[in-house]
Every structure is written in structure tokens, then in C-alpha cells.
Image (cartoon, rainbow, N blue to C red):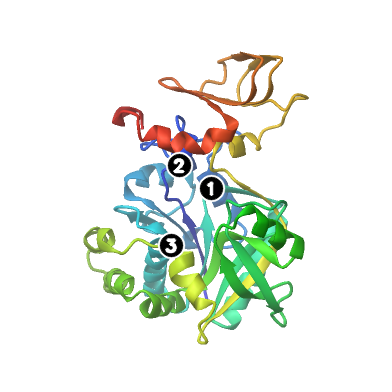
Amino acid sequence: MARFAMIMAGGSGTRLWPMSRSAMPKQLVPFIGGRSLLEIAGERIAGLVPPERRLVCAADAYRDLVLEAVPGLEPRNFLGEPIGRDTLNAVGFSAAILAARDPDAVFCVLTSDHLITPQATFEACMQTAFGLVESDPSRLATFAITPTHPATGYGYVEYGDAVPGFAPAVHCKRFVEKPDIKRAQEYVASGRFGWNSGMFVLHARTVLDAIARFRPGNHAGLMRIHEAAANGSDLARVVSEVYPGLPKVSVDVALMEPASVDAALSVCTVPMPVDWKDVGSWPSWGSTLPADDAGNRASCPAVHLGSTNIVVASDDPSHTVATIGLDHVVIVRTKDATLVCRADLAEQVKDLVARLPPSLR
């Protein structure tokens, strides 16, 4: 079985406006020490699969930007979505293409909006998951991040019995969508739950067969894409015709949850004890920077007088931001827009973006 890797790089990243824009979404913005999240994700898989077997699934409009951001990515390995149709179709699109290239293809599905360390632990968990699926293609492998606090913004995976011969892998007992704080506290205290990472290792044909059972409406369109890829016909035309009409649904809801109670399939989970940062908002981005004694973090020169817990970002490394007497505030400056907001309201940035003129989105 040949190993492949696919990075999902969709999403608009509106909560990271004004740096993340429709023309340059967050996964392509070089705001992590001068590198983009997609570039970092590409480096993360360097030791897992050879360059010719690495794919990226993203909006077709970003084709050139993605090829530039991921050195060594072959043009045929960029899977361009005419329009985003959620994660089931991104995974199904990849499975359709890979099954046409290799009927026994096994691929990991990775995200482009996380920072994961240490790399050695990440790679060891990936190797375990690849082994799980290669030894039994009916398995769908997931990864559960070891929780550090009772987060209510993540889904959870409940651990079942151990998978013999593949420690520390366990069978997945169930998936739980974002819980309230009381349940989240109970989950973390029990030690029987991990955060749903959104990463998987899957057998391409198994994915397509499972989608046929659980989501036949999606399967029909994905098989048209598969047949075009297998026959060498006009794949781009078929994708442009089929993809926009695929029912929009997440891979967790449409595939992983029903698979976890399907007798023909086995969902396994590999606990992943790593430092996992979901860079989805300005406060979470700020956590990637060192803090001063007052908890202030900045990617540009910043001077504070009596201010605490300030996050400052600028697209101009020579631009100085100064504050007086502020607490828990986010300040983001670009050449044509500036955001100032309370840190606890940072999730509302996406609502603010909807009110902006199209030229600023």
C-alpha cells in the first residue's frame, strides 16, 4: 500500500481579519514567524510521505498561491475546489483522485490551521495510524489531542478498548460535538476523552464505499470525478460541473459518526499528547508569541504604559503600536484597515467582516 498525505486548506479565516482576506486567507498569510500555516503544515509531513505523494485541497482560486507556499507540491497534486462544500467532500475528492491512481492508496488527512509540537510525537502517532489502516483497510483512524483544559469549542472523542498490537491506539466509543462547560469538565476529569483533532488516516476505497452507504448523494458526484481521473478525461471540467452541487456536510457528521456504529467498519483513535494550537482567532494567534511581564504580545514594535494582556499584530515590522491603560485588547494593523477589539469578543470579528464593503473583506 502506498502512503499519501492530503492537507485541507479551505476556509476563509474571517476571524483573523484584517490580515486574512478573501484574496489571501489565513492559511496563506505569513504571520507565524514569517511563515504561513500552510507552509508549516507542508513541512510537518516531510518525514511521512515523499513529495510526489503530498496533496493539498483548497479553493481553485488559490492555486498559484498554494503551489508557491508548499515547495515541491506538484501541480497535479493541487485539488482545486470550485467552491467550498465542507470537509466530507474535500476528503471524498481526495479519495476519488487517489483511488484512481492507486486502488490501495492510504492517506492521512491533515489540517492547515494548527500548530503541533513536538514533531517527533506527531510523526510517531501518524506511523501508528498508518499501520492500523494498512493492516486492516476497514479501519478509519482518528487522532485525539490530550486535553489541557475543559474546552467547549472543540468536539471530543471517547476512548474505548485498546487495539491489540497498536498501542496506544484504542477503539472509538463515540464522537461528541462541542459540549457545554459542565460536560467538558466531566470529560477532562474522566481521562476517557480527547479533543477531536480533525485529522485522519484512511483507505481511499474504504472512504468511497462508506460514503456510498452513508451519503449516496455525495457518492454519485464523487464517483464521476473518480471516473474522470481514472479515464484521463477532462478532470477539471468534471470537477467544475459536479463539485458545486455536492451536498455540503462535515466529515465528522457524514462519515466518522455513522462509521463508529457500523459493524462493517472500525473507527480507531490514536491519542496524541502534543501541544496543539488551533490558530483560528487573534487571541489564539497571540498565544504563539512570547509574552512580556504584563502578558503583552506583539509581532511588531510595541510600547505599553499600564497596559496588560494586549495582542498586537502588524503587516509592517517597522510600525510601532503604543497603548495606555488597556487590558485584554487585540490591535491588528494593516496598510488599509485596523482592528481594535476586546479579546473576549474576538469571535465576533467574523460578524464584523460581513458588514464591511467587499473591497475590504
Q: Residue at x 60, y 82 (%)?
A: 135
First in sequence, mark 2 or 1: give its number: 2
Q: Tell me whether circle 1 and circle 3 mark residues in contact (CB < 8 Å).
A: no
Q: Tell me whether circle 2 and circle 1 mark residues in contact (CB < 8 Å).
A: yes
Q: Is residue 153 above or below residue 301?
A: below
Q: In the picture, residue 182 is in which quadrant?
A: bottom right
Where does residue 172 sit, x and y in percent of width and height?
Answer: 62, 74
Q: Amino acid at mark 2?
A: Gly
Where does residue 226 sit, x and y in percent of width and height?
Answer: 32, 72
First in sequence, mark 1 or 3: give its number: 1
| Residue located beneath label 2 in the image | 13
Q: Give the crowd class for mark 3: few <14, some 14-19, many >=20 residues within 10 Å.
A: some
Using the numbered discs, state the Cα–Cα distance from disc 2 to disc 1 in whole angstroms: 9 Å
| Residue located beneath label 3 in the image | 250
Q: Residue at x 68, y 65 (%)?
A: 193
Q: Residue at x 32, y 76 (%)?
A: 216
Q: Secondary structure at mark 3?
A: loop
Using the numbered discs, state the Cα–Cα distance from disc 1 to disc 3 in whole angstroms: 17 Å
Q: Give the crowd class for mark 2: few <14, some 14-19, many >=20 residues within 10 Å.
A: many
Name the quarter where the C terminus is drawn: top left
Nearest the camera: 69 or 327? Answer: 327
Nearest the camera: 136 or 51? Answer: 136
| Residue located beneath label 1 in the image | 113
Please identify, in this view, whether the residue under mark 2 or under mark 1 is nearer the observer: 2
